[in-house]
Image: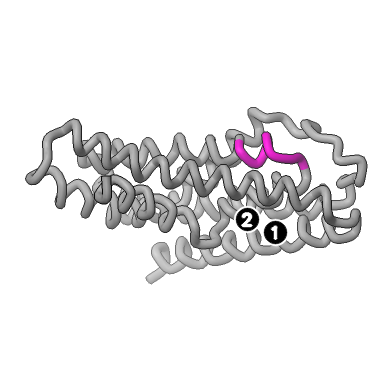
Amino acid sequence: MAIFFSYVFLGLSLAAPIGPLNAAQINQGIKNGFLHSWTIAVGALLAELLFILAVFFGIVHFLETPFMKTFLWSFGAFVLLYTGIESINSSHKIEMNHERGKESLLKTFASGFLISISNPLSILFWLGIYGSVLANTINKYENLQLLLYTFAIILGLIIWDLTMALVSSSFRHFLTNRTLKVISIITGISLIGFAIYFGYQAFQLLFY
């Protein structure tokens, strides 16, 4: 059980660093409530499951080719830029009546999936972290235990995402309309900042 919980903690550690997904999740939680914040996390979780499968079956090396890296950095920059600008533009629509569900859940899910699947940093995380877990356990344990430890990592991610959704949506009730708008703008700017970083990485790969 100690090993199992260590992998749960690993999943928490992977999800915890503030990145574009956390910024988007906070933004959704404040604007639209728990369900939207959780939905964006579910979209990202699906992408992370695909990364796990890619590492498990060795497909991830295809994603390390210069062409795919450039494509992912560029696509990631576009997704984050669009999400960030939309967050800023929609900040004036936030109302203090706490009405929820104004934005499509399918759109929110797709946004979480695209932010995660187009993030080369996620690929590096899963290649490095899950790849090392796979290398460490595959020779020591049976497939059932390997699946159990993989589940433990995913459980850690789910716990963090649920916490983020609860905290961000709960804060909505204690903030003024002006503060909600400011936070929406700040998270939008942070997403644009990540987009610029992604775009710079794509530019370096293309021209250096």
In reply to whether residue 37 is colored magenta, the answer given is yes
In reply to whether residue 9 is colored magenta, the answer given is no
Tell me the quarter of the image containing the C terminus: bottom left
Q: Residue at label 2?
A: 23
SS type, badge 2: helix
Quarter of the figure with residue 125: bottom left
Residue 79 in the image: above or below residue 183: above
Tell me the residue at 37%/48% (across/down).
8
Span colored in magenta: 32-38
Name the kind of residue labelled 1 in the image. Thr
Whole-percent x, y for residue 35 in the image: 67, 34
Q: Which tag, 1 or 2, sits closer to the chain's start? A: 2
Q: Residue 164 got which mark?
A: none
> On the picture, is 41 further left or further right than 125?
right
Name the kind of residue labelled 2 in the image. Ala
Whole-percent x, y for residue 180 in the image: 83, 55
